[in-house]
């Protein structure tokens, strides 16, 4: 049995929940070890609090985006404590490693390697580290993530190290039961406390509520469950809608599991690529309606595992290097202006699924198959990771 050290983005920081699917379902012949400390977790909260404050100020945000990579680097150097003993490989969560040891790195997009700050000042440094013999593999989660690498860096020295490995979720192992009297629509925001204040708008909550205003007038048997932080003004506006249930707090997985199991359609007209929540919805046999922005079309096969709608017409979703602009002040202002065309398309695609029970169930079953047996299955992911780990540890 070989051991892989799963290292958070900074020393002692808690890993994102998406890594649970890796820790508890590793490739054959491998096990993961993780370390954490209280000082790291408290510093993580401080950084996240600073991120939330800075994103509201455009000039400050520009300066902060240049400072942040340096801050992460020096923090990591100061907190670069002893590694676990007898480790065969380090798996870096979205950051580069300067130590001389075999390591691989995964990433959402190229910006992650600069702590989600500006790449320009640190481009040559990052390129040198990725070219080094210590870096064995670079693993973007999507093809769009790979394209952002190729557009952002001179990859000639390490392009052969880049390999897409899709995120995956474990099968839920339940028998789907359907209620023919009610059709339940589900929207889920983030459970990440660092992004919770902005998640409602970023993940399409405003569009979902506006679309439901039309849907509830057309179909008397639809209801909407919103599991997300909802701004006070928005919550007040929809307080008298008896067919909307808002869960505006982070709940135990058992509660969320029930909401997924009893839902019929998953709505996610987000302005970002959310990843795991779409796959979770598919694993619960739910057809997904999502926006065709950045890498979403890699997750949702339009007409087969769900439907895609166009993003907002006045929103710039990524820069010239295909790095998403999620969280930029101008981006945040733009997504708060709900695009009527986007709402109209969301209503149209959802209506198709509401009216056609057979199609709704067929699409849901296809999505579940992809999670249990196809490109988003643990089996497919682990086959790729085992090959990568074997090659990285063969020296």
Image (spheres, helix red, strand yellow):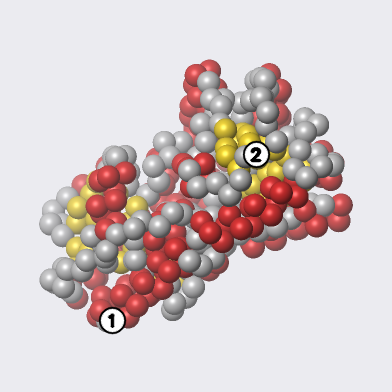
Q: Quadrant of residue 304?
A: bottom left
Q: Cα distance, mark 2 to mark 1? A: 47 Å
- Where does label 1 land, which residue? 358
Q: How many marks?
A: 2
Image position of 314 with respect to 234: above or below: below
Provide the residue designation for mark 2: 2
Q: Callout 1 environment at 10 Å: few (<14), some (14 to 19), or many (20+)? A: few
Q: Of helix, strand and loop, which one carries label 2? A: strand
Residue 213, placed above or below residue 138: below
Please identify the quadrant where the N terminus is shown.
top right
Residue at 25%, 46% (x, y): give it.
255
User: In the image as oriented, which residue stretches furthest toward the right?
Assistant: 157
Image position, residue 97 (x, y; %): 73, 34
Q: Which mark is residue 84?
A: none
* Residue 158 located left or right of residue 14: right
Q: Secondary structure at mark 1?
A: helix
Q: Position of residue 330 (x, y in %)?
A: 54, 49
Disc 2: CA contacts within 10 A as few (<14), some (14-19) or many (>=20): some
Look at 54% across and 65% down and name the residue there. 375
Residue at left offset 50%, top offset 19%: 38
Instruction: Answer with left or right where residue 48 lies relative to residue 323.
Output: left
Residue drawn 20% across the image and 52% down it: 245
Q: Nearer the viewer, mark 2 or mark 1?
A: 2
Quadrant location of the C terminus?
top right
Given residues 339 and 166, the one toward you in this image is 166
Which badge, 2 or 1, comes first in the chain's sequence? Answer: 2
Left or right, 302 with reference to 5? left
């Amino acid at each position: 049995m070989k051991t892989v050290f799963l290292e958070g983005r900074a020393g002692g920081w808690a890993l994102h929940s998406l890594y649970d699917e890796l820790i508890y379902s590793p490739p054959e012949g491998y096990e993961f070890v993780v370390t954490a400390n209280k000082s790291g977790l408290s510093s993580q909260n401080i950084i996240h609090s600073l991120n939330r404050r800075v994103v509201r100020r455009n000039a400050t945000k520009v300066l902060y985006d240049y400072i942040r990579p340096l801050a992460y680097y020096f923090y990591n150097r100061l907190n670069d404590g002893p590694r676990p003993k007898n480790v065969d490989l380090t798996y870096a969560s979205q950051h580069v490693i300067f130590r001389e040891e075999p390591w691989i790195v995964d990433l959402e997009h190229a910006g992650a390697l600069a702590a989600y700050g500006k790449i320009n000042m640190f481009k040559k440094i990052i390129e040198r580290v990725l070219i080094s013999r210590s870096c064995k593999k670079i693993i973007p989660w999507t093809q769009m993530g790979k394209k952002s690498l190729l557009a952002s860096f001179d990859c000639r020295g390490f392009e052969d190290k880049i390999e897409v490995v899709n995120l995956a979720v474990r099968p839920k192992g339940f028998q789907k039961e359907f209620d023919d009297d009610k059709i339940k629509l589900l929207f889920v925001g983030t459970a990440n406390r660092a992004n919770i204040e902005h998640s409602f708008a970023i993940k399409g909550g405003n569009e979902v509520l506006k679309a439901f205003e039309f849907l509830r007038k057309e179909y008397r048997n639809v209801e909407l469950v919103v599991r997300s932080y909802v701004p006070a003004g928005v919550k007040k506006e929809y307080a008298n809608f008896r067919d909307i249930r808002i869960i505006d707090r982070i709940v135990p997985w058992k509660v969320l599991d029930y909401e997924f199991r009893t839902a019929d359609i998953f709505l996610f007209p987000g302005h970002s690529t959310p990843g795991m929540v779409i796959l979770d919805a598919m694993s619960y046999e739910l057809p997904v309606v999502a926006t065709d922005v950045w890498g979403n079309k890699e997750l949702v096969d339009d007409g087969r595992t769900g439907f895609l709608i166009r993003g907002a017409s006045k929103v710039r979703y990524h820069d010239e290097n295909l790095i998403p602009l999620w969280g930029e002040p101008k981006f945040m202002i733009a997504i708060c202006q709900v695009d009527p065309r986007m709402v109209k398309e969301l209503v149209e695609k959802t209506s198709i699924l509401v009216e056609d029970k057979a199609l709704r169930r067929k699409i849901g079953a296809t999505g579940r198959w992809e999670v249990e047996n196809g490109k988003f299955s643990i089996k497919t992911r682990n086959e790729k990771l085992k090959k990568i780990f074997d090659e990285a540890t063969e020296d």
